[in-house]
Image (cartoon, grey):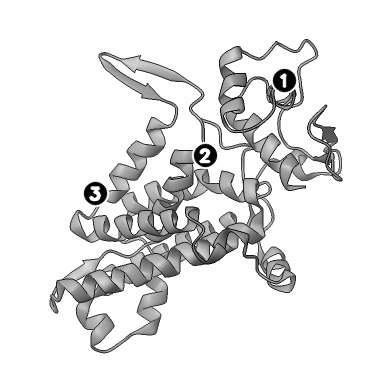
Amino acid sequence: MNGGPSGFTNAPVTRLFIVASAIFTIFFGIQGRFGTLGLSYQDIFGKLRLWKLIMSIFSFSSTPELMFGLYLLYYFRVFERQIGSNKYSVFIVFSILTSLLLEVLAVALLKDPTANLVTPGPYGLIFASFVPFFFDIPVSTRFRVFSFFFSDKSFIYLAGIQLLLSSWKRSILPGMCGILAGSLYRLNVFYIRKAKFPEFISSFFSRIALPSMGSSHATSSSTTRHSVGNLPSHPARQVERNYPAPMQSAVEPSEDSITTLLSMGFDRNSARQALVQARNDVNVATNILLEAQSH
């Protein structure tokens, strides 16, 4: 399944978050301090350790969790490309804080002073991202293995299930809190989906973000500005694209792909033009259409 252009093109916030998670996890792993992370009743209602709270947001507790977690964070960069880095930063902050609040309430209700009830890691953000993944990312291919039916989205769900069950009860709790946080964001509580950070804050994060890890040609000056054909007229009809250019002999998009985009609210002509540019890749065409609407 395609999440758009390879690398971190147009996803600086995701890149920064992934790098931070990897660094903190490796640091605590070398120090052998994974056991000091995670939340317990004593941490919250006894001696509050703010550093532990902050580090628990970024650091995974094992290498397998790190691998699955970073893979999912990397895939979900598609949402930063769809809504922009500023709004995606709001989504990150809202998901983390809301899931953290729900975790605290759950720990308070369970009232077990000795148990480490919540495993560390950005579970809130990862599982909050499964909500728009479920509703907004279309299925582009389906296949059958023996008597079981799968789609291209199945691999993301399987990685999520693996991460959710990685520490059993300690990982299920933050995972469920993350899904609730993502649902609240989708319901637009407090009109959160319209919120943005001030420009000076987003500019600051753009400056500290590392150079893009994508292919050099994707960000070089030789990258051309592809028009989206007859997409709805917007002031910025020509925006920088890193999607595949249409082939010389364009293949007519399949009717199933057009129908999928029509079901998402796009008009037929725009859907067809985007699919031609995306070489009949529904996910890439969806990104093209959403980016065109945001300009």
What separation in Å lies between label 2 and label 1 (alpha carbons)?
21 Å
Secondary structure beneath label 1: helix
9 and 150: which one is in front? 150
Q: Amino acid at mark 1?
A: Val
Residue 190 placement, left or right of 208: left
What separation in Å lies between label 1 and label 3 (alpha carbons)?
40 Å
Q: Position of residue 138 (x, y in %)?
A: 51, 31
Residue 79 drawn above or below residue 56: above
What separation in Å lies between label 2 and label 3 (alpha carbons)?
25 Å
Residue displayed at 48% across by 21% down: 141
Q: Mark 2 near mark 3, Cβ–Cβ under 8 Å?
A: no
Q: Position of residue 175 (x, y in %)?
A: 32, 55
Which of the two labelled residues, at mark 2 and mark 1, occupies the earlier sequence position? 2
Residue under pointer 2 = 136
Residue under pointer 3 = 165
Secondary structure beneath label 2: helix
Local packing at callout 2 (Cα closer than 10 Å; few below 14, some 14-19, many 20+) is few
